Image (spheres, rainbow, N blue to C red):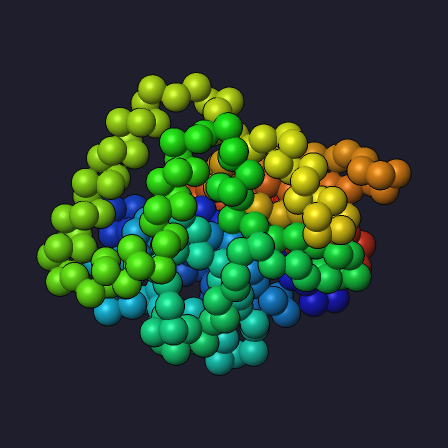
Amino acid sequence: MASTLFISDLHLSEERPETLGLFSRFLQERAREASTLYILGDLFEVWLGDDLLPPGCAQVLAELKQLTDAGTTVRVMPGNRDFLLGEGFEQATGCELLQEPTRQKIAGTPTLLLHGDTLCTDDVAYQTMRHTLRDPAWIRDFLNRTPEERIAVARQLREKSREATGTKECAIMDVNAEAVSAAFREHRVERLIHGHTHRPARHESEFDGTPVERFVLGDWSDHAEILTCDENGCQLERFA
């Protein structure tokens, strides 16, 4: 039975060779068994434009292309670290970029797919910054800058983010319960899948008399938590 796989928050970079190696093996082994692979954000630690490939990540694009050429459908939702993924990435890999949010029927169940950061509404400062960075005018101006200028801006933003994160309570950076409820009701789904918080888990609840479930995907390090869905339902599994 062909399955559908979900992963997120790999944060691939040359500084994390163990994760690059794990993802390479995943693409060559586990992903080849799936009909569709969804990557729900932060595949890369940083993506500053399709013309500025992160150091050490050229092989990632080549191996994704090998996977899509072999017949596995790969759909990628940009996250807060790689929201500038564009057509160049699609052409190089054969992957399909997804808008956020995306409503899909997964194994017969209406399912909402998100990266997950939009659910963290208690972090007002982050949401304000996110709104600025997603503005088409800001993106256009940023991509028109030289590679050196883009790298410098990214470093400044990352440093500000680290400073801000260090002063925040953990609860503020998790999802807001009301935001989750609103997503279920607005999109009329029975399942929600997201990453971003790095807290892999399955949560059960009920809205308007309908049982629902929310899966949180984990981040990658020396192992990965992947979500497998088929006609029998969904379950988190470890890949190492």
Q: Position of residue 93 (x, y in %)?
A: 41, 73
* Residue at the front extreme, as displayed: 137
Q: Position of residue 28 (x, y in %)?
A: 47, 66
The residue nearer to you, when weighing 68 against 100, is 100
Please report the residue visible at 70 percent of the width from the left and 52 percent of the height from the top.
187
Residue 72 versus residue 201 in the image, above or below? below
Please report the residue visible at 45 percent of the width from the left and 47 percent of the height from the top.
9
Residue 25 versus residue 207 in the image, above or below? below
Residue 58 versus residue 18 in the image, above or below? below
The answer, for residue 22, to whether it is visible in the render is no
Is residue 174 rendered to the left or right of residue 64?
right
Q: Position of residue 163 (x, y in %)?
A: 26, 27
The residue nearer to you, when weighing 129 against 26, is 129
The residue nearer to you, when weighing 2 against 203, is 203
Residue 163 versus residue 6 in the image, above or below? above
The residue nearer to you, when weighing 90 against 217, is 90
Please report the residue visible at 63 percent of the width from the left and 48 percent of the height from the top.
193
Tally of marks: 0
Please report the residue visible at 25 percent of the width from the left and 52 percent of the height from the top.
14
Q: Quadrant of residue 50?
A: bottom left
The answer, for residue 173, to whether it is visible in the render is yes
Q: Position of residue 232 (x, y in %)?
A: 80, 54
Q: Quadrant of residue 214?
A: top right
Figure quadrant of the N terminus: bottom right
Is residue 165 rendered to the left or right of residue 147?
right
